[in-house]
Image: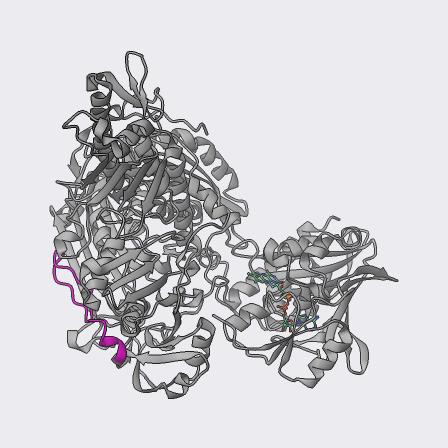
Amino acid sequence: MDDIKVNQNPKLGSMDRPNSYIGRSLPRENAKKHLEGGGQFVDDLVLPRMLHVAFLRSPFAHAEIKSINVEEAKKSPGVFDVYTAKEIDEYCTPWVGTLGHLGEMRSPEQTPLAKKIARWQGEPIAVVIANNRAQAEDALELIEVDWEEKDAQVDMETALDDNAVVIHPELGSNLFWTRTVNQGDVNQAFETSHAVVQTTLDFARHTGVTLESRGIVADWNKSEGKITIYHNGQAPHMMQHIIAKHLEVNEGLVRIVSRDVGGSFGIKVHVYPDEMAVAAISKKLGRPIKFIADRLESFTTDIHARCHKISGKLGVDKEGKILAMEINDLSGIGPFSMYPRTSAIETNQVLNLSGAPYVIPNYKAVGTVVFQNKTPMCQYRAVGHPIAVAITEALIDKAANKIDIGLSEIRKKNFIPDNAYPNKTPSGVPLEDLSHEASMDKLLTMMNIQDIEKEKIANLDKNVLCGYGVISMCEVTNPSPLFYGVGGAHISSQDGASIRLEGSGAIHLSSSITEQGQGTEAIMKQIAADQLGVSMDSVRVTLGDTDATPYGGGTWASRGAGIGGEAVLKAARILKDNILDIAAAIMQTDKNSLDVENNTVIRKNGGEGITLQQLAETVYYRGHELPKGTNPELLATASFLIEGIPFVFTNSAMGCKVSIDQDTGIIKIDKFWAVEDCGTQINPKLVEEQIRGGVIQGIGGALFEECVYDDQGNMQNATMADYLVPMAYEMPDIIVDHVTTNSGRSIIGAKGAGEAGTGGAPAVIMNAVNNALKHHGTEVLSQPITPEKILRALGKI
Amino acid sequence: MKAPDFSYFEAQNIEDAIKYKSEDDEAVILAGGQSLLPALNMRLSSPSCLIDISKINNLNEIKIEGDFINIGALATHSDVMNNDLVHEKLPCLVDILKMVAHAAIRNKGTHGGSIAYGDPAAELPAFAVAMNAEIVLSGLSGQRIVNAKDFYLGLFETDLKSDEILIAIRYPLLDVNQHLIFDEVCRRHGDYAMAGLMAKVELDQSKINNLDLVYFATGDKPNVGQNTAKLVIDDGYDYEKLKKSLASEIDFAGDLNSSSEMKLHLATILINKILNKLER
Ligand SMILES: Cc1cc2nc3c(=O)[nH]c(=O)nc-3n(C[C@H](O)[C@H](O)[C@H](O)COP(=O)(O)OP(=O)(O)OC[C@H]3O[C@@H](n4cnc5c(N)ncnc54)[C@H](O)[C@@H]3O)c2cc1C
C-alpha cells in the first residue's frame, strides 16, 4: 500500500507543500518506545511508602455475608490492615449508575465493597493492605466469611418472570430500563408487505481483554489536601470529578495522571468499585496505594459486554424495498448499572442504529434491560453496534433469499442515497455526510462476488462449504453533549488543545485526548506540525494529566481525531497567526507576505527569513528589541465541540468469505474486506490499524469469545487459556479501502474510525456462515459461532 | 495471582533431587515450569519446596540407544523440534510439537515435564502410548522402566512414585512399514485440542496389518481405541460403526469447548482423516 494518500479536504490546503503531514502514513514514534520497553504504565510506578492491596471477592453469584472475621488476616506477615465496607464507606460516598435523559432508570446505590450481600462472583467484599501483593494474597486466605448462599438470577430471559429472584427487593423487580421507539405503523406495513421475514439472534457475553489490566495508584497528600491518582483510564477529567465527588475532596485538588495505557476498548472508562476503594484507602491512610488487577480479576470484574437476545422482523415489497422493521431486544447487565455512563447505552444504541443505512419508513424497536447475578455489563468498543448491525443485516439477507434477489442488490435498493443527506435513521437520529452507495460499490469491485459464487457452487457437495456476506453499517463517532452531558453526567464532550513555541524553537502540545496505543500522539503531532509549518520532530506532546493538559472528554466513542484533532488544528492556526504577527513586526513587513515552512518564517517573495528559534529567542530573552506594542503571545489554546447533532456518523461496507469444514465445524475466514468512510484520514496507516484491529475483535465476538457461566452464576473460563481471543493464526487477510466524505462539522473533516470493524465483523461473518449453510437448509443464530454449534446445525451431532 | 511462599532447591544432580524429594512429601519437581508455575500463581497448589531439576547436566540429551531413540527429560520442546536425530528418525514428532502451545512456551516446556504431568489433553502422553514408549524413572532404589501404556492411571495420575524423577523417554524406532500419523481439531492454533488422535499404523503393502489408536483430549488419560482399531483393519472407515465402537470403549468427557458428543464425533472423523493421510 502506498504510504501517501492525497488529502481530499480543500480546507486543509494542498499536500504539495513542505510539512504537509495530514494525510500521510508517518511512523509513530511511541511505537519505538514501547518496543524498547520504555513505556511507563501504572504498574511501573513505585512511590515511597507505597502499600499494595488484594481484594477478597465473592466466590458466589448471590450470597449473604452473615459475618466476616478479619482478625487472623490482620496478623499475617506484612499486612498493614484489613478493611471491610464499614471502614471504606467512611471515606467514599456511594454512587448510582443512572442518567436523566433516557427515561426512567432504576439502579440501586453501589459502594466500593459489598455490605451485606454479594451480587456477582467477583464482587469485592474486603481488602487486605500489605507490603506487597503476595503477602496481601496470603492474608486473603485467612479471612473468614460466614456465607449464606442465595438463589441466583443468572438467566436474563427469566429475570422478569414472577418467580424470578429479585436482586434488589427495594426495586420490586429486575427491570433496569426499557425504551420503545415507534416510527410510522409497522403492523399495517407488515400486512401490506409482499414478504415478511423474522429471526432471533443470541449474543454471548464477552469482555475487552486489554493487554494491560486495570491499574491504579492513589496518593493522598494530607498536607496539601491533594490526591494524585495514577490510573490507566481513558477519561482523566471525568475521573477527576468522580474522585472529588465521592472522596469529598475539592475537585481542583484532584490530579489524574494517565500515562501509557495498554489498551482500553471502553473497559477503562467506567468507575470500578475496587479502584474507588483504593482511592479511599489512600485518603484514610495518607499513603500511596497500588492495585493492579490480575487476569482472573479482569475476567470477573472488568465490564462485560453484549449479552443480548434480539428478535427482528422485516417486511419488503415485491422489488425488495423495505417497508417495515421491528426489533425486540433483551439484555442482561449484571446486578448494577455501571457508573457514570450507565448500562443502558448499549441497548439504546441497538434501538438507535438498527436499520441505520436504509430507508425504512415504519420502524418499531423495544429494548428491555434487566439485572442478573453476573459481572456488570457496560459499554465496550462498538457499543451496541454488533447487535444492531447483525439483526439488520441478517433480516436483509433473509428477505433477499425469500424474494430471490442478490445480497448487494437488495442493499443498494434500500440505501439512503449518498446525495440524500442530511437524513435520519429509521429511529429518527440525524445523519449526514455518508456514502453507503459509493462504499458498497467499492466493496463489490474489491470482492469479485462472481468468483466467490462459482467457488461456492463448486463446493456445494464437498466437505468444505463456502459462503460469503456483505453488509453496510453506520458507526457512532464524535458525540456531542447530547450523549451523556445532557443526562447529568460530568463527562465533557468538548476537548481542548494548548500549543506553545518554546525558547528553543520547539513546539509543545498538550491535549485532553488520551492515548491507549492507537496513535493519538502521532496524529496530534501531524496536525500541529502540518498547520504550523514545522518538522514532526520539533513537536512534543503531553497527554493524560489533569494538571498539565486542557480540560476535556478524553478518548472514547471514536472522538480523538474528530474532536481533539480539530482543537489542535484550531490552536495551531492561532499560534501560527501570532507567530506571523510577531515576525511581521520584527521583519518590518506585511504579515500576509510571510509564511512558516520548515520551522522558519519565510518571505513568500524570497529574501531572508527568520527561524522560529530566532523569533522565540527574541520574544523570550530580548523582548526589548520588539517594536512597542507587539503582542508576545506564543501560547495558544483552543477547544472544539460538536454542535447541533448528537453524533458525527461514519459508514462502512464490509464483506467476507468463509469456509466451513463439515466434519469438524471449524470456520475459516478466508478473506475480509472493509471499506470505511471516516472523512479525512490524518494518518491512513493508523486508520487501517483501527479497522483491522476492530475487525479482529469482531472476529472474537463472532467466533470465539464468550464468558461462560454455569447455572449458579460461576464464570467457568476466567483465564486466557480458556477464554479464547483470536490470535495471529486466526487473523485473515483484511483488505481495507476508503471512500472519503468529509464531515461538514469541522475544518479537519475527520470522523471516527475506531469501532466499525468490531461493530460490523460479527454481522458479516454470521451472514457468510449462514450463506454457506443455506444449501443444507440450516443456520446458526447465536454468537460465538462455535464448531459445536455448526455441527449441531448440520445434524452431525 | 502470586504464588504462596515456597522454598527453592536447585538440584545439581539426580541423586540430590531424589534424596530431597524423598525427604519432603510436599516438595515438587520444577522442570520448564510452563504447567507448574501457572498452577502455583493461581494458588491451585501450595508445595513446600520447588526442586529445580533444570540445571542438571546431560538430562536433555537426545541419542540413539540400540533400537530406541532416547529423549532426556529436560529436552525442551524446541530442543526436540530442532534436533537432527529426531528429524531423521522420528520426523512425526516435529510435526506434533508444532501443535504444542507457542514458541515461547516450547522454549521452556520440557519433554519429560509434559510426559510426567500427564495432562489428558496434551499430545505427548498419547504419542508415548501410541509409540509404545518406555518411560525411564529414577528413585531411591535405582532405575526402573515403565511402559507408557501402564504409566497413565487416571486424571493427572501416573505411576510416578513420590521419590521418583522421570529422566528419559525411550521411543522404539519405527520400521519402514510403520507410521505414526496424527491429527487433532483445535478451536485456535496452539490450543489444547477438542480431540486428537495418534495412530500407529503397520502396513503390509497397502493393507493395514496393525493399528493402534490413541486419543488425547477425550477423557481422563490417553484413551486407547483397541476394538475400534480392529474394526478399521477389518472393514475400513464406516462412520456409524466406528462411532458406536468408540462410544462403547472410551468414556468421553466434555469440556468447555466441546461436549462429550462432539468429542465422540471428532474422534470418529479423526480416523478418516488419519486414513486419508496414510500414503498407501
Ligand atoms: C499457554 C500454554 C499452552 C499450552 N499448550 C499445550 C498444548 O497444546 N499441548 C501440550 O501438550 N502442552 C501444552 N502446554 C504445556 C506445555 O507443553 C508444558 O511445558 C508441559 O506440559 C510441562 O512441561 P514443563 O517442563 O513446563 O513442566 P513443569 O511445569 O515444570 O512441570 C509440570 C509437572 O510435571 C512435573 N515434572 C516435570 N518434570 C518432571 C520430571 N522430569 N520428573 C517428574 N516430574 C516432573 C512437575 O513436578 C509438575 O507437576 C501449554 C502450556 C501453556 C502455558
The image position of residue B50, as x and y in percent, is: 63, 75
Asked whether B227 or A638 is in front, the reply is A638
Q: Does the magenta stretch include residue A495?
A: no
What residue occupies the far right of the structure in this picture?
B66
The residues colored magenta run: A87-110
For the stretch drawn in magenta, what is the main secondary structure? loop
Q: In this view, does A202 lie above or below A614?
A: below
Asked whether A301 or B178 is in front, the reply is A301
Asked whether B280 or A243 is in front, the reply is A243
For the question of whether residue A368 can be seen, the reply is no
Q: In this view, does B279 lie above or below A733?
A: below
Colour scheme used in the picture? one colour
Residue A300 is left or right of residue B11, and the answer is left
Residue A241 is left or right of residue A612, and the answer is left
For the question of whether residue A63 can be seen, the reply is yes
The image position of residue A410, as x and y in percent, is: 29, 36
The image position of residue A86, as x and y in percent, is: 25, 80
Q: In this view, does A754 lie above or below A342?
A: above
To which quarter of the image does residue B241 belong? bottom right
The image position of residue A46, as x and y in percent, is: 42, 62
Q: Is residue A92 magenta?
A: yes
Q: Quadrant of ligand 1?
A: bottom right
Residue drawn at (70%, 60%), measured in percent from left and top?
Answer: B199
